[in-house]
Image: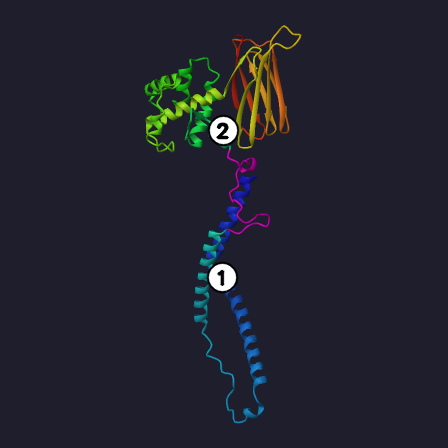
């Protein structure tokens, strides 16, 4: 429907501008001249009446010519030239003003965005910013990671893909960033090893006063991306120990905070274990917990709390927790790892 509306608006604008720049027909010129002649005759009659009313009768004696004197009328050719010139200037002026400030429909307000998107986003928030609002909360030691929204979005997407993998941590870390640095596998592998053991020097980033990702050197960009990926993977992983404290995660979104609590325990009076996930969500949303052949889901149509629970989960099984806000397309995926001891 929005595409059809755009076509109608563009067609209207094109036809309107074509009309403005078109030459008038002989019928239009005759009509304008007739109206102008009637107006000129009326103005002349009014001026004569006013002047005769103001004229003193005593002074009228001895006047051999009319008091009112009209300048010689313009010829037909001169009227046509002036008319065409004036119309041309008017058309160009109207066209430039309309292009600079298009007219609004009655239902539009001043400053309204005239671009009509095919999909109406919630409160006009860019989809890329739904989950990337968490970026400012990603930190490594005391160093803030100065990434761009687009880089963070790419890292978040790739981290959600590898967080479910059973590969070694170093391999997952390199896979999370290698799409940003094609052909640099060995350099990434070397830096990833240092990042995992915490041997990277803070001074490598601070001494050169790195303020933005775009102004950093290629090596610094690799290091920043690996550090960010490490923290993102950690935020997306919930390691739950049997009958120990609840594991919590918070994730900031463009529409509010998502709060997750995971508990791996043996319910009272039961002999088997249970994995329970509680989610407090800022909008209508769904939770899905799955692993192997087991799966459970919950959904609500307004902000609030949701619970999902799996009974007798396997400790060696990695479970996938998917959070989806119903008004948005992109979900957020966590990995839940269970440990008995």
The residue stretch that appears in magenta: 102-126
Distance between the Cα atoms at labels 2 and 1? 64 Å
Badge 2: how crowded within 10 Å, few (<14), some, or many (20+)?
some
Q: Foreground mark, 2 or 1?
A: 2
Q: The N terminus is located in which quarter?
A: top right
Q: Position of residue 52 (x, y in %)?
A: 57, 85
- Looking at the image, the residue that sits furthest to the bottom is 62
Vertical position of residue 305 compared to residue 165: above or below: below
Q: Nearer the viewer, residue 126 or 240?
A: 240
Judged from the image, the secondary structure of the residue bearing numbered disc 1 is loop
Image vertical order of residue 267 relative to residue 85, above or below: above
In the rendered structure, the answer to whether residue 64 lies left or right of residue 175 reads right
Task: State the mark number for residue 25.
Answer: 1
- Residue 203 pos. (x, y %): 34, 26
What residue lies at 46% left-to-right and 28% top-to-bottom? 153
Establish if 155 lies above or below 55.
above
Please identify the residue farthest to the right as the structure is shown. Answer: 269
Q: Nearer the viewer, residue 155 or 278?
A: 278
Camera-side residue: 11 or 259? 259
How dense is the environment of label 1, judged by Cα within 10 Å: few (below 14), some, or many (20 and up)?
A: few
Q: Which mark is residue 154?
A: none
Decide whether the magenta segment is chiefly helix, strand or loop: loop
Viewer-nearest residue: 8 or 280: 280
Identify the image's colour scheme: rainbow, by chain, secondary structure or one colour. Answer: rainbow
Q: Is residue 180 left or right of residue 6?
A: left
- Whether residue 123 is in magenta: the answer is yes
For disc 2, the marked residue is 134
Query: What residue is at 46 percent from the left and 24 percent from the top?
Result: 157
Quarter of the image where one finds residue 271? top right
First in residue order: circle 2 vs circle 1: 1
Q: Secondary structure at mark 2?
A: helix
Q: Position of residue 87 (x, y in %)?
A: 46, 62
């Amino acid at each position: 429907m929005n595409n059809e509306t755009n076509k109608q608006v563009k067609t209207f604008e094109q036809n309107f501008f074509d009309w403005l720049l078109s030459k008038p027909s002989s019928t239009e010129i005759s009509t304008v001249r007739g109206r102008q002649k009637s107006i000129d005759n009326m103005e002349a009659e009014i001026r004569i009446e006013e002047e005769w009313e103001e004229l003193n009768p005593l002074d009228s004696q001895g006047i051999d010519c009319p008091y009112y004197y009209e300048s010689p009328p313009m010829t037909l050719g001169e009227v046509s030239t002036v008319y065409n010139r004036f119309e041309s200037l008017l058309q160009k002026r109207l066209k430039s003003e309309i292009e600079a400030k298009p007219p609004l429909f009655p239902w539009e307000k001043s400053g309204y965005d005239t671009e009509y998107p095919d999909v109406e986003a919630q409160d006009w928030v860019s989809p890329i910013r739904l989950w990337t609002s968490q970026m400012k909360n990603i930190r490594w030691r005391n160093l803030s990671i100065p990434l761009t929204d687009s880089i963070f979005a790419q890292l978040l997407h790739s981290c959600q893909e590898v967080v479910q993998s059973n590969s070694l941590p170093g391999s997952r870390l390199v896979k999370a960033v290698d799409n940003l640095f094609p052909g640099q596998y060995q350099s990434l592998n070397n830096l990833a090893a240092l990042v995992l053991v915490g041997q990277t020097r803070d001074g490598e980033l601070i001494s050169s006063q790195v303020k933005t990702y775009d102004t950093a050197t290629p090596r610094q960009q690799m290091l920043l991306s690996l550090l960010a990926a490490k923290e993102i993977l950690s935020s997306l992983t919930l390691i739950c120990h049997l009958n120990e404290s609840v594991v919590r995660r918070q994730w900031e979104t463009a529409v509010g905070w998502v709060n997750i609590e995971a508990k791996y325990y043996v319910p009272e009076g039961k002999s088997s274990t249970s994995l329970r996930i509680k989610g407090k969500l800022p909008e209508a949303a769904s939770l899905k917990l799955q692993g192997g052949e087991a799966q459970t889901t919950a959904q609500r149509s307004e902000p609030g709390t949701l619970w999902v629970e799996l009974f007798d989960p396997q400790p060696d099984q990695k479970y996938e927790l998917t959070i989806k806000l119903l008004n948005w397309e992109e979900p957020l995926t966590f990995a839940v790892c269970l440990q008995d001891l």
